[in-house]
Image: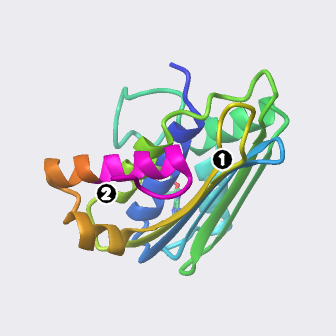
């Protein structure tokens, strides 16, 4: 299985939610020849030792999910970033929170495909729990393709679409996110 950038990001966001974050910030920018991601949370954070363990590709934790998917998680993300000459930085403070930043050069052969951006946002917003989330998205215009720039706040979306556990709300939210991604000038009716 080859993970897209969006697959990796969803994994990282899930960690933030599972770490008990009240606020998760997600930036996804495609500009200046790079795909840049920042995920910041105010969850429980990690000690230096926990951080090293989280990044260790040989860690075997007996498995929350024995035998599950390969190729995701922080060690694989770091590996994918390094293979494409990208940048990777994980900062964490126990009891305070965690910030992960990484970027890929857009034109490197080993850079994974970006993947399904509105699908990523929809899933990232739909985890269970009362966390707030602020998404910032920018994509530079390319020949034949307009750029886009928008922001989504989870609490505002939930006010408009309802809580995102129901199928109808999820479909509505998905359409809304697709319209933001596609047009750059907001949803069209
Ligand atoms: N944002 C974060 N805040 C606090 N701890 C984190 C964060 N991200 C990762 N960790 C720690 O690193 C560990 C490893 O993360 P990783 O995503 O690789 O596996 P997992 O979340 O335990 O399992 P899975 O992702 O398969 O559900 C986590 O269990 C957690 O202890
Ligand atoms: Mg995880």
Q: Which mark is residue 147?
A: 1
Q: Is residue 65 above or below residue 108?
A: below
Q: Nearer the viewer, mark 2 or mark 1?
A: 1
Instruction: Name the residue: 31% across, 57% down.
Output: 127
Q: Secondary structure at mark 2?
A: loop
Dot 1: within a 10 Å radius of its alpha carbon, few (fewer than 14), some, or many (20 or more) residues? some
Q: Position of residue 122 (x, y in %)?
A: 37, 50
Instruction: Name the residue: 47% across, 47% down.
Output: 10
Residue closest to the eye, 101 or 36: 36
Label 1, ligand 1: CB separation under 8 Å:
no
Residue closest to the eye, 58 or 112: 112
- Image-quadrant location for residue 110: top right
Q: Position of residue 62 (x, y in %)?
A: 40, 39
Read off the magenta span: 173-189
Q: Position of residue 95 (x, y in %)?
A: 53, 80
Residue placed under numbered mark 2 in the picture: 127
């Amino acid at each position: 299985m080859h993970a897209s950038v969006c697959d990796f990001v969803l994994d990282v966001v899930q960690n933030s939610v599972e770490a008990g974050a009240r606020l998760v910030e997600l930036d996804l920018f495609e500009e200046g020849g790079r795909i840049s991601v920042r995920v910041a949370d105010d969850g429980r954070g990690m000690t230096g030792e926990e951080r090293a363990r989280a990044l260790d590709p040989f860690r075997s934790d007996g498995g929350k999910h024995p035998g599950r998917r390969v190729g995701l998680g922080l060690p694989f993300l770091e590996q994918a970033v390094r293979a494409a000459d990208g940048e990777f930085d994980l900062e964490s403070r126990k009891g305070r929170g965690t910030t992960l930043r990484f970027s890929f050069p857009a034109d490197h052969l080993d850079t994974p495909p970006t993947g399904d951006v509105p699908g990523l946002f929809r899933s990232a917003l739909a985890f269970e729990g009362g966390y707030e989330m602020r998404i910032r998205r920018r994509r530079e215009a390319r020949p034949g393709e307009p750029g886009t720039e928008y922001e989504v706040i989870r609490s505002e979306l939930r006010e408009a679409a309802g809580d995102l556990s129901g199928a109808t709300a999820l479909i509505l939210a998905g359409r809304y996110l697709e319209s933001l991604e596609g047009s750059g000038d907001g949803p069209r009716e």
